[in-house]
Image (cartoon, rainbow, N blue to C red):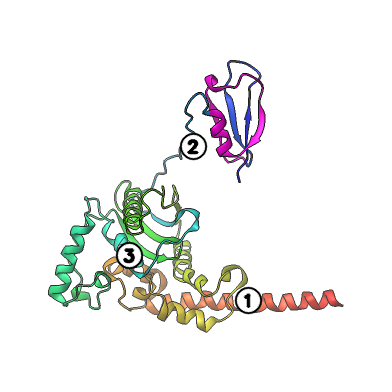
Amino acid sequence: YTVYVLERPHRRGEDLELREERGADSQRLPHRLQTPRRVREACTRADLIQACTRSALIQLKTMPHQKRQFENGEIYHITVRRIGNELLSGDEQDLYRLIYGIYEFNNAKHVSIARRRQQRASFKKAVLGQTSYESVLGQTSYTAVEQDKRDKVVEVLAFALMPNHIHLLVRQLVNNGVSIFMQKFGSGYATWFKEKYNQKGKGHFFTARFNAVRIEDNEQLRTVLVYIFTNPVALIEPGWKERGVASIEKSIEFLEQKYRWSSYWDCLGKKNFPSIIEKEKDFVLEMLGGPEGCKKAVDGWIKYKGELRRLLAKSFTIKIINQLE
């Protein structure tokens, strides 16, 4: 647990200082809440609150984050994670709802998900005779894609859903577009999830601040695209980024044939979620050299990690032999 230190100041006019021992935060408590004698004790956050609220109600406020500025036309690699690294989804329907949110909340206008689901279901029924929730974004034909009437705030260039976090590659189109999109997407899915699983009183769902890295050049862009597309390998090869890949063939097959919750299939020419990525993928493919170049880049990175695994295994074996000698 986190340990806090509560100190009485040397001078009467000063405030009490609350210091978090690990150095992450520091705050001041009002003078009127000082104790009548010198106090210096280590305690948990709960003990501290109990001690300080005998005569008044205390609120511990965290320092606000500095507002980030995102520039129009620039590309950002965004990672958003659930608090406590808990799972983002409980079943497959939740994964479809995440995909649906990436599409629908990319809109400067007010979005009513219930109304949009009705509209899209009517469209699907009229075109393909499909009414299931899962068919909303997984069209099998480009002609079945509903006319896009959104006022988009970002371009979603790539994405990948992981068990406890999401990778997004976006280009900002309007002022504050990245922030608007992430706020709508995060609050929209969190509200839906809490209602579905009866967790309305559990507080925040996603971490308070998503991570965003600006893409500086084409080399970095290609690297990030491959990173996003290969991220799901961790589901079958835990720790593969550090230790390498045990089975190259298995990892490639997993990405190409079994794991559909990313934009990789669409970039390979398999229509998976064309509503999100159909137009934007042209830019991605231009960067990677078409579907063949995309596959070559992804396979090449996995093969490199496979070779790394063999080198590490060989080095580890030699080290053991040397120790035995």
What residue appears at the point 67 percent right and 77 percent down from the top-left corner? 311
Tag 2, which secondary structure?
loop
Q: Is residue 157 above or below residue 307?
A: above
Indicate whether 217 appears above or below 258: above
Q: Residue 99 — which label?
A: 3
- Disc on the earlier residue, 3 or 1: 3
Q: In the image, what residue type sits under mark 3?
A: Ile
Quadrant housing residue 82: bottom left
As rendered, which of 10 and 184 lies closer to the eye? 10
Q: Residue furthest left?
A: 126
Which structural element holds mark 1? Answer: helix
Give the labeled residue for mark 1: 309
Q: Residue at x 26, y 55 (%)?
A: 152
- Count the marks: how many? 3
* Residue at the farthest bottom position: 249
Residue placed most toward the observer, 112 or 324: 112
Magenta span: 23-52
Q: Earlier in the sequence, mark 2 or mark 3?
A: 2
Q: Residues within 10 Å of mark 2 (few under 14, many from 20)?
A: few
| Contact check, label 2 and label 3, Cβ < 8 Å | no
Task: Tell me the CA gap for discs 1 and 2.
Answer: 43 Å
Give, as a three-letter code, the residue at label 2: Thr
Task: Classify mark 3: helix, strand or loop.
Answer: helix
Camera-nearest label, 3 or 1? 3
Disc 3 to disc 1, how far (Cα)?
A: 33 Å
| Badge 3: residue crowd in 10 Å (few <14, some 14–19, many ≥20) | many
User: Is 41 contained in the magenta span?
Assistant: yes
Residue 25 x/y as whole percent = 56, 38
Q: Which residue is mark 2?
A: 62
